[in-house]
Amino acid sequence: MAKLAIANTNRAIVELLEITENPRHRFMLQAYYRHRYLEIAGRYEEIFAPDMMVEDPVYHFHALGISTRLEGQDAIRNLYRTWSETGECVMYTDDEEVAVSDHMIASKLTGYQFKPGHILAAAGIDVDDHDAMYIYKASEEMVWPYDDRCRLVGEDVWEVDPDRAEIIKLDPADVITPQEARQILDPFIRPLPAFDETAMRPARPQRSRIVAG
């Protein structure tokens, strides 16, 4: 398996931004884009900026071998820190569809997350090499709610059919480290635009839009 083109992970967001005119929806999509690349690049501390996340976010994960509820920035920061240390922050999406509305972004995708063998084994997944790096490939659905100021309220992530997940062992040459991910993605990570009252106001009655990656 060749190295994943992680710089293409946000292409469905880019395509949706190209046809989205509403300022509020554009701001949310740009925040969504920025959050995902910061996470993959291991620059997780920047996700907690006051213009990007509420003070008391709540995450629900039922995907990628995880079933948990995380409440508060400290708990979520600990998850991102662990992923950066283990290489699990490196992810890729394919076949993605993204939809945006006034207080929510929804996504349907095929997700790929790097997972060390010992992490998979600890989760009860049978692997033949605890020292190798694997990819956990699965169909996922996500809903990310946002507040009136377009700040992330949390993440709700589901794995559609865990029994159909694929565990793919990587050749060492195909492994992307967090350091390499940062080098690849840093040129694509842009500051958010200034938030103003136009973006703050809900966009109703305009309907949400959807795009397939």
Image: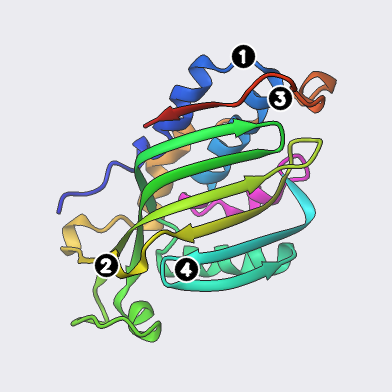
What is the crowding at mark 4: few (fewer than 14 residues within 10 Å), some, or many (at least 20)? Answer: few
Q: Is residue 40 magenta?
A: yes
Q: Whole-Å distance between the Cαs marked 1 and 4? A: 39 Å
Residue receiving disc 1: 21
Which quadrant: the C terminus?
top left
Label 3 sits on a secondary structure element that is helix
Residue receiving disc 4: 85
User: Is the residue 38 above or below the residue 208 in the image?
Assistant: below
What is the crowding at mark 2: few (fewer than 14 residues within 10 Å), some, or many (at least 20)? Answer: many
What is the crowding at mark 3: few (fewer than 14 residues within 10 Å), some, or many (at least 20)? Answer: many
Q: Position of residue 39 (x, y in %)?
A: 52, 51
Label 1 sits on a secondary structure element that is loop
Q: Earlier in the sequence, mark 3 or mark 2?
A: 3
Q: Position of residue 73 (x, y in %)?
A: 73, 62
- Of the pair 126 and 170, the residue shown nearer to us: 126
Tell which tag, 4 or 3, sits nearer the viewer.
Answer: 3
- Of the pair 155 and 34, the residue shown nearer to us: 155
Which quadrant: the N terminus?
bottom left
Q: Earlier in the sequence, mark 1 or mark 4?
A: 1
Side of 124 relative to 71 (left or right):
left
Q: Quadrant of residue 89?
A: bottom left
Tell which tag, 2 or 4, sits nearer the viewer.
Answer: 2
Residue receiving disc 3: 24
